[in-house]
Amino acid sequence: LSETVLFEDILKKQLLKDYNKGTAPPWVVVQHQLSVWQIQEVSTEHQRMSFQGWWRHYWVDSRLRWSPAEHGNLTKISVPISDLWLPDVHVYMQTYGTDQPLSPVNVEVYSSGQAFVSIPRTVTFGCNMHLDQFPFDTQTCW
């Protein structure tokens, strides 16, 4: 094993030793970003829309800070999503949605405590469409 892998394993064990993933970090502010990869369906008949994309979350967890100088100059580690607190986020008025990890999803954690995760999602939500001005209509979905 490389020295970096050893430092990373030791650091993960130290950070997660007394970590409670059921408790939110103190004073946490979460930023969200939806990156749409593909619109799968726009159904005027069923008044809905479906897309695939990534639901990205950014936050700082002060419990996950470390000094790179004390840990082989590591500035970033990857931690399995199941080991950390995650923001509880849902799409409002979602009629159907699934997380679709194609491979294990990890959270990228930086020495500052900054955390980032990008979760693949398929989402279907209602869209009350007004087509009386088609093809010059504009739709607002909820």
Image (spheres, rainbow, N blue to C red):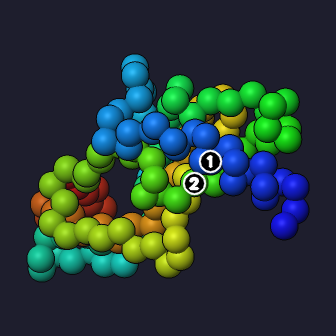
Q: Quadrant of residue 94?
A: bottom left
Residue on which disc 2 sits: 79
Graded by Cα atoms within 10 Å as few (under 14), some (14 to 19) or many (20 or more), the crowding at tag 2 reads some
Q: Is residue 4 above or below residue 110?
A: below
The reply, left or right, for residue 49 in relation to residue 103 is: left
Q: Amino acid at mark 1?
A: Lys
Q: Quadrant of residue 3?
A: bottom right
The residue under the point 45% across, 47% down is 84
Residue 131 seen in render = no
Looking at the image, residue 108 lies above or below residue 119: above
Q: CA distance from mark 1 to mark 2?
A: 8 Å
- Do the residues under discs 1 and 2 have CB atoms within 8 angstroms? yes
**Marks 1 and 2, the one that precedes in the sequence:** 1
Tell whether 107 sits left or right of 134.
right
Identify which amino acid the numbered label 2 is placed on.
Val
Give how far across and how far down residue 42 sits, in percent.
28, 74
Q: In which quadrant of the rendered image does the N terminus lie? A: bottom right
Residue 46 placement (x, y as % from top left): 12, 77
Q: Nearer the viewer, residue 97 or 4?
A: 4
Q: Which residue is mark 1?
A: 12
Q: Is residue 110 visible?
A: yes
Which residue is depicted at the point 46% across and 37% down? 18
